Image (tube, rainbow, N blue to C red):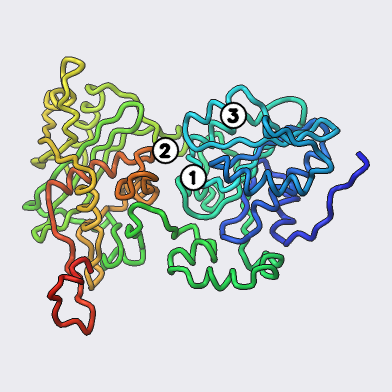
Amino acid sequence: MSETVINFSPSTPQLKFLLAHQKYVCYGGARGGGKSFIIQRKADMLAYRWPGIRILIVRKTFRELENNHIVPMRKLIGKRAKYNRSDKVFTYPNGSTISFLYCASEGDLLNFQGNQWDCIMFDESTNLREEWIKEILVCLRGTDIAFKRAYFCCNPGGVSHHYHKRLFIDRRFVSGEDPGEHVFIPAKVTDNKALAKMQPDYIKQLDNLPPKLRKAWRDGSWDIFEGAFFEEFMNDPTHYEDKRWTHVISAKDFELPEWWEVYRSFDWGYRRPFSMGYWAVSGDGVIYRIAEFYGCQRDTLTRESIPNEGVKWNPDKVFQEIKDFEDNHPLLKGRDIHGVADPAIWDKETGISIAETAAKYHIYFTKGDNRRIPGWMQVHYRLQFDKRGFPRIYILDTCKDAIRTLPSLQYDDHKVEDVDTEGEDHIADEIRYFCMKHIIQPLEAKTPAGHMTDPLDMFTDY
């Protein structure tokens, strides 16, 4: 090829990204790190260097692909590669190609099936669901090019935040995942000298964001991010003892008085997980999640939960296992346990309802109130901290799946007050049923200073 790749001066993180040799490379972690730009440069360099290589760039929507990649890349490599508008493919004289596909729903995955790529680049990958990413990665195969690479460029937040955090930040791997194949390259706006020169006010804009958003987008914190449905949920081990400003507390020193009532709450699942939560209610109405039985697939070696994958047990198997669990758990055995569940388990479409099967094992429920918005508001009220820092719901630190799934839930794109039901919401659902069984009022807000009276109810919502 007669024409060389255009020269540019990468930042230090961008240079590390270009030189990374691991199979799975995650880049970014904050706004303004030059993620889209470096994807385009890397794709162009690979296509120029490796004849016949097949490269795919993925984003959530086609509009994002067109605005963030196709249009600028036509300017960048328009003289070196021919662009096919209908197929959305750049083709180089040496046979290399750069293709573009979007994935906004499960139906879009059909466009990936049967294809093979040597390199897949996910831009804003945390906006794609974990199961979608895994299915797309199946297409990372073929024999023409020896090496295979997957690149993830992203910020904290999004539906697969916890998947990325587990792999690249916490580095907690399950069987089949090789730690040596994964690397995270952090990049912040302060690393992007070109952006600072072109848009000097951009850093100031990030500095002026609300505290939680600033920590995620400017500082690259993966522990705090916006967009969570239960954004008030806190897990602070430094407060496990005094139980202030945290919803999670230690199970080590927890004592359950005999006179506290104990409950179970249940959400059925087969292909997706089922969830049984156990609760104790204190004399002042505070609820404690003291145990849980979560029916999800687990890694055979680490016993890590496989997100949103049910065990596919029939009802008899489910309730036999739950019965054994209750009979042997130190906080549950011998207790009189009241139950509440989704009214759907009384459906008799299969001849005998799930509720009737549960009763065979002396596990009983009353029909829960499954109204979604009022139910979510009850959970939000429970999560509120009073002025001293005490909430009205606690979760023992042994309830690992509740602690894992609650922070990961997102708002629905179309129903702004509801949770996105495509997420792992099964524990949240049974918590909702239980909270609707124990209705509370929101904490009283303070009247704004200087307003002694409010004749027009102007500050009612305050």
Q: Characterize the local packing of mark 3: few (<14), some (14-19) or many (20 or more) Cα atoms within 10 angstroms.
A: some
Q: Quadrant of residue 351?
A: top left
Which of the pair 409/360 is nearer the observer?
409
Using the numbered discs, state the Cα–Cα distance from disc 3 to disc 1 in whole angstroms.
Answer: 17 Å
Quick one: SS at disc 1? helix
Residue found farthest to the bottom: 450
Q: Amino acid at mark 2?
A: Pro
- Mark 2 and mark 3 residues within 8 Å of each other at the beta carbon: no
Read off the residue under disc 3.
138
The residue that disc 2 covers is 307
Residue of label 1: 163
Foreground mark, 2 or 3?
Answer: 3
The answer to which of 280 and 115 lies nearer the viewer is 115
Q: Residues within 10 Å of mark 2 (few under 14, many from 20)?
A: some
- Residue at 28% across / 59% down in the picture? 247
- Image coordinates of residue 294 in percent, x first then y, are 30, 37
What is the CA distance from the residue labelled 2 to the residue labelled 3? 18 Å
Q: Nearer the viewer, residue 20 or 225?
A: 225
Along the polypeptide, which appears first: circle 2 or circle 3?
3
The amino acid on which the numbered mark 3 sits, given as a three-letter code, is: Val
**Residue 148 visible in image:** no
In terms of sequence position, does the residue under pointer 3 or pointer 1 come before the other? 3
Tell me the crowding category of disc 1: few under 14, some 14 to 19, or many 20 or more residues within 10 angstroms, Cα based: some
Residue that protrudes farthest toward the top in the picture: 351
First reached walking from the N terminus: tag 2 or tag 1: 1
Q: Residue 399 at x, y = what percent?
A: 30, 47
Q: CA distance from mark 2 to mark 1?
A: 9 Å
The image shows residue 29 at horizontal and vertical percentages of: 57, 57
Residue type highlighted by circle 1: Tyr
